[in-house]
Image (cartoon, rainbow, N blue to C red):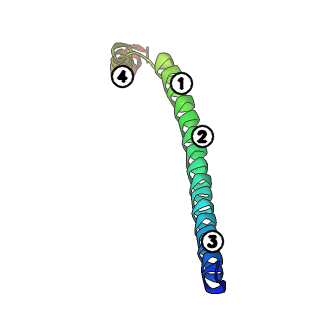
Amino acid sequence: MKPGKHLGFIVVTVVLVAAGGWILTSQWQQKMVLQAELESARVAGDEMQQLRAENRRLKERQIPDAELERLRADHAALPRLRAELEAMKPR
């Protein structure tokens, strides 16, 4: 091999190795970013599951609509009933 061709081969080899290293580094960095995003999504998914479970638990403890309406009606009738009671008291 002639000295000029030998130098050209070395330059091409160095450029290819540098480009390959850059590509590998770039892909490794992208992999790290994606892994961080995946972990964040997992945490968010876990939090979402906990919130759903808490929501179900709270819904189970919630007063049914019919019972709530009955309580509201009773509460609204209190002033009228108090007035009737006061009217019945001996003076």
Q: Nearer the viewer, residue 14 or 36?
A: 14
Q: CA distance from mark 1 to mark 2?
A: 15 Å
Q: Callout 3: 10 Å neighbours few (<14), some, many (20+)?
A: few
Q: Which residue is mark 2?
A: 43
The answer to which of marks 4 and 2 sits earlier in the sequence is 2
Residue type at mark 3 is Thr
Disc nearest the viewer among 4 and 1: 1
Q: Quadrant of residue 88?
A: top left
Q: Which residue is mark 4?
A: 72
Number of the label disc, if any, that sits on residue 85: none
* Helix, strand or loop for disc 4: helix
Q: Callout 1: 10 Å neighbours few (<14), some, many (20+)?
A: few
Q: Nearer the viewer, residue 64 or 51?
A: 51
Disc nearest the viewer among 3 and 1: 3
Image position, residue 24 (x, y; %)? 61, 60
Q: Quadrant of residue 43?
A: top right
Image position, residue 68 (x, y; %)? 38, 19
Image quarter in which the C terminus is found: top left
Residue type at mark 4 is Arg
Q: Which residue is mark 3?
A: 13
